[in-house]
Image: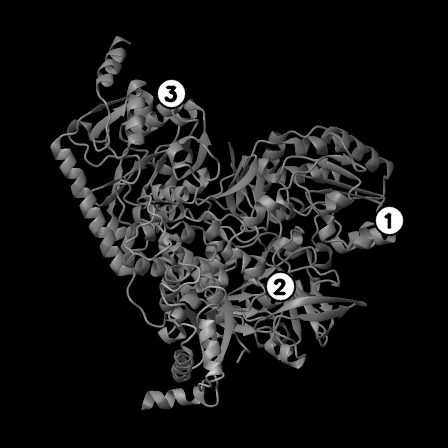
Amino acid sequence: MSQDSQTIKTAHQIVMQKGEMYVGWSTKEDVRKRGGSGGLVTSMLAAALEKKLVDAVVVLKKMNEFEAVPIITSDVNEVLNSAGSLHSVPSNFAKLIANRNLKVALPAKGCDVRGIIEQGKRNAINLDNTFIVGLNCGGSMHPVVTREMLEVMYKIKPEDVHGEEIEKGKLIFETKDGKEHAITIDELEEKGYGRRESCRYCTIKIPNNADIACGNWGVTGDLAGKATFVEITSEKGAKLLQNAIDAGYIQVQKPDEKGVAARSKIKGVMEGLGKKWKDKVFVPMDNRLEYFRKELENCIDCGACKAVCPTCSCGDVSKCTEFHFRGDAYRMSMYHLVRFLHLADSCIGCGQCADVCPVDIPLTRLYRRFANPVQEQLKYEPGMDMRKPPFFEAKLEV
Amino acid sequence: MSSEAAAAPKTNGWEPKIVAFCCNWCSYGGADSAGMGRFQQPASARIIRVMCSGRIDPLHVFNAFLEGADAVLVTGCHIGDCHYVNGNDKTKIKYKFLENVVRELGLEKERLQLNWISASEGEKFANFIRDVTEQIKKIGPSPLKPEGVV
Amino acid sequence: MNAYSTICPGCNFGCGLYIRENGTIDLDFRKSSPANAGKLCRFGMSLPRLYKPVKSMVEGKETTPEEAAKEAARRISASKGSVAFLSLGNTTCEEVLAFQKLAVPYLCTGANFDALPKDVYLTLSVGIPYTEIEAAKHIVLFIDPYEQYPLTVRRLLSAKKKGAKITSVWWKDLPLADENIRPADISKLQLTKDSLVISDFHPLSDAEQVKSVLSLAKNAGAKVTFLKPFANSTGAYVLSKDAKQKSFAQLVEDINKGTVKTLFCLESDPSTLIPSETLSKLTNLIIQTGHASAGTAKANVVIAHEPLYRKKGTLINNEGRGQALGGAGTNGLEALGIIAGTKFEFDSLHDAVKKALGIQAVDEFLIPKYDRPAYGAIQAAAKPPEAKTTLVSVYNPFMWFGLPDDNDFVELNLNTVRALKLLKGGTLKIKSNGSTIEKKFKVAPVQDNILLTGNRFGIEKGSITPVEISR
């Protein structure tokens, strides 16, 4: 007990500021044990809720090793018991908190953060009331692909899996018997397994667009695996971290230089890999009209790609749906044409649309074909800052 | 030569359908003076008058293509001359996006064109329509034309 | 915020999803679901529209579920001998077992098993695993997967990628088919023992058509699988295997004759299947359900229980996979208990379900072994040639559930448009049984003289209706 109050005392002396970096961990043993990397994120969210910095928190409620449901909760215990980060839960939280007018804190991968910021620009989320805890992300995996991969590549039963980790380019599964099974991500992806396609060419590995960026990259020495590296990227982030320290939920210390260097090295390598993938996927092609028609001919007009799209905030009544009638015998659907146009400046390449398409149209790849040239020409990266989408500008600047 | 021969059957007697969006204050006036001045121009253009080129939603252009237009022209006042101060600046933005989608989709660049035409430029308008008609005759009907539509 | 892991009731495919309740009903994609990898079709995406809250009613007056169930029990015992029980397989296996006990005098699961040989029962009830569809070398479709069972499309595309040939026996060319054969040209169909035939089986299925599909597969030694339109069709059929049942056609006839005066429906909307003039002959229409529908508006007694996603229980999908619903509600069983004058315990019914399936626990990643015995030779009557012009109803989830959709048009081909000189953007007059309707049309690669629709216009006589068309 006395030791705890000691911690709080020393913690009070630190005043968190934008741009600073720390290494930290949860003061609660059970959270440390359950959550990955010292349970800092979970504790920070719980502290925000406990100290009324926010009214609600988004957490993953774990159903089993491969399954977790994102829920919004105001119950601190539910936060402390949440699942932490899972590589096989490719969800996007932007739509979950949109149009709810919440004062909320939530963990977010790079693409989640971008989605939330885009919703913020469209007035569906009040960013002043949203505390975004960014998570480093090297990519996520589709759960069904993961199951098949475990059986085919790793030759282990999905039910026996206890934990997972990505380290030095390898995807490692730990089974209940304590054994580790590792295969390089390159090999997995060559065989069509591994990360989702959009994750492969994603170049946002450390989410500096969030309020605070957290991850295990840069945690060195004895702390490896037991602590989280954090970088404060906004005033809100500073407030969030300070609040958790003041509440006695977490402890932090300055990172060593080796760690800072290691973190930026990993970031560089991962981003380089992403760019390489991008060139590999988006090769120039002829006869594109035939390609798009072929890919879209199986569309059943379910509308899932729009419903899940984290940058779309039109709601049910929108241009793409209102001017589309299933009885039109057009060569290409109006719905898709309008979406190609609207996503040209807004697509963040999160891959949600391709994930939910019932007829397996590689939608993200199609949208990116339209988005890449526009975003490059206009030097616009959606979801990275508060710049207005160029389509809504009064004058073309570039 | 050989490419011309290949294109020949398509163009034989075929008259393209061109949808031209014209703004009320300038390019529609241009179309009007083209008629008044008796400048020769083909009958391929269908003119749709809008109050301002900034009103032209990319959706209108998509709709024209999907309904069977072989080319769509977006015309308006010269930059700086907009009746509504900056309507055609907005046209430029929308056109930028529209152009990107139409090009990426694989349609030829002749099928979508932007031109600023003032009310006094009747000859420019007539020449524009004539040039586009010639270009489209060379490349043939739009691949987006619905089945059964000529 | 409540989140339920549940199964889409739209058809028998067994698509997993989450439903969140937070004042409104929201969907989320359950990407780990083995049947659909989280993907949902057009109907699945419309589920928040389906789950409209329903209230217990007796003759239009609101009451509690207990009172409504007691009133239902009184009416059922009062019209003893003229009561029929209908449940199409939209509810859990546990409720199906309870329902069977109640429905001993007149059980109808909606399928016309009477008209078919006994030994095809299980072949019709349980389909083959979807991985076998993906592994097939030649697939023959007697359905339109896009309209009727959309989640099969990705399995078919996956098979095609691996080199499968896809033959469609349908009135319209399908984008994914390598070969399109018209139903009238069925003699052109070449089947081998490597073929897999996919058809469907539902309350309005034509028995002769089902028999002819079965006999084609039998003669070629090909595999055959039947898709079905209700979430637990497979469960309902498998569990009713030994129960005495009446066919759906018999039920309609009995209501028309007046020998059935009271109809009890469990989680089924009779108004989507039974013509309204027939339904109006009933003295008592009793519906027990979890969501409002056209039927509940007409019913004399409505017993409202939890919607499917809040229920506790087991569904069995077309592959035979047992799938646990993520809710905790059992008040459907309580209501059935009041009507039956007994108390149904969930646990014992659940054990009975597991026993019937021969499994220890419900695991969605395991498909229990089913006995699909080889069936004997089947004689199928030759189909009469189609009349000059016919309207073909393509049954899809929106039709089975009476949910409005963006489908107020008919599909026809360019020849028909030209012959009738139809105007682009105009309408087509369709005349049948003395009534005429005017509909928009869509040009599609459809057979000459065929109109296809995924909608119900009210002029149909079964799935194939002779019509006259004009401009």
**Mark 3 near mark 1, Cβ–Cβ under 8 Å?**
no
Q: How far from the left and from the top, in percent, is residue C65?
A: 72, 31
Quarter of the picture holding the N terminus of chain A: top left
Q: Nearer the viewer, residue C115 or C447?
A: C447
Looking at the rendered structure, which numbered label has been put on residue C259?
Answer: 1
Q: How far from the left and from the top, in percent, is residue C377?
A: 64, 65
What is the distance, in whole Å, between disc 2 and disc 1 at their CAs? 33 Å
Q: Which residue is mark 2?
A: C214
What is the distance, in whole Å, between disc 3 and disc 1 at their CAs? 69 Å
Q: Is residue B116 above or below residue C40?
A: below
**Mark 2 near mark 1, Cβ–Cβ under 8 Å?**
no
Q: Nearer the viewer, residue C407 or A77?
A: C407
Q: Is residue B144 visible?
A: no
Q: Nearer the viewer, residue A361 or A129?
A: A129
What is the distance, in whole Å, between disc 2 and disc 3 at their CAs? 67 Å
The chain to which mark 2 is attached is C
Q: Mark 1 belongs to which amino acid?
A: Thr
Residue lying at the far top of the rendered structure:
A2
Nearest-to-viewer mark from 3 and 1: 3
Q: Is residue C442 above or below residue C13?
A: below
Q: Which residue is mark 3?
A: A51
User: Are the residues under marks 2 and 1 on the same chain?
Assistant: yes
Q: Residue at x 49, y 83 (%)?
A: B43
Q: Residues within 10 Å of mark 3 (few under 14, many from 20)?
A: few
